[in-house]
Amino acid sequence: MKNQKNYLTALEYKNFDEKDIKEKIGIHILVGYINGFEEDTGIQLMSKLLEIWDEEILEVVIRHCFNIEEKQLATGVERSDVESRILKLWNELINKCSSEDLNSDLKNIELIKDSIGLINNFSIINESIVKNLTFAFKYVSNSFEVHDVVDYCERLINSNQAYPTKLITSLVFELFNQCIPSYPEETIKKLLDYLRDNNEFESLNQILHTYVRLTKKSFVVNYISKFS
């Protein structure tokens, strides 16, 4: 990415029809962004992309940002910096989507749902992450779309790090109450146990009613019923 001005020109042109050209533009913008090249050059390609709002390029960026590996990072780039940049991108994406009329724009809804996969990059939890996921959950139509969040919550509760319990219980509640996941069963049970162990009985009761109302059959109903 030696000449970012070329990418800026390409974004401003924004009339490419070829899918492979948009694929390459999106990947190169993402690589430069997560490695901080924009900060070095002052050419804010990601901000320009969000301003133009080309859904196809944004889709590429999000998809290739699902799980950033160490080999994708430039020398000296810290993992914490990458997480911070990805969270900033996610915040801006959600903020813009939340101000739009999404009922008539299926592409934006798909971008919001796709952005859930960004959670794979995070070793932390904070209010912004919970806020973004809670917003995205509203557009989930199948529980398999949140399997990454189920894994993320399990990583948090199994970690030796002192993560804020209230944030985790809040996220787990929203996950169950909005998305009604039932797989994998043992992980789901572990998350429900976490709510019980932290005395979140009102949340569990609400989850129970949600499952009874929205699912024909789920082990979750019987499992929660045993807590009382």
Image (cartoon, rainbow, N blue to C red):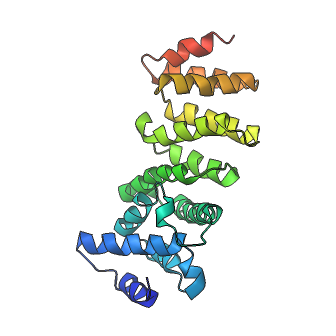
Q: Quadrant of residue 202?
A: top right
Q: Is residue 89 above or below residue 7?
A: above
Q: Residue at x 66, y 54 (%)?
A: 128
Q: Image point 70% across, 22% down: which residue?
A: 196
Side of 175 where 19 appears, left or right: left
Residue 225 position, x and y percent, is 61, 11
| Circle count | 0
In the rendered structure, the answer to whether residue 217 lies left or right of residue 80 reads: left
Image quadrant of residue 19? bottom left
Q: Residue at x 36, y 84 (%)?
A: 10
Q: Quadrant of the N terminus?
A: bottom left
Residue 50 or residue 124, whichever sits in front: 124
Residue drawn where x is 72% and y is 39% of the image: 160
Looking at the picture, how far across and down is residue 11, in whole percent?
Answer: 39, 81
Q: Is residue 54 among the parts visible in the rendering?
A: no
Given residues 33 and 58, the one toward you in this image is 33
Query: Residue 126: in sight, yes or no?
Result: yes
Residue 114 is situated, as x and y percent measured from the top left of the image, at: 43, 52
Q: Is residue 178 left or right of residue 52?
A: right
- The one nearer the camera, 164 or 200, is 164
x, y (%) of residue 199? 76, 23
* Residue furthest left as drawn: 18
Quick check: 160 above or below 133? above
Task: Give the quadrant of the C terminus.
Answer: top right
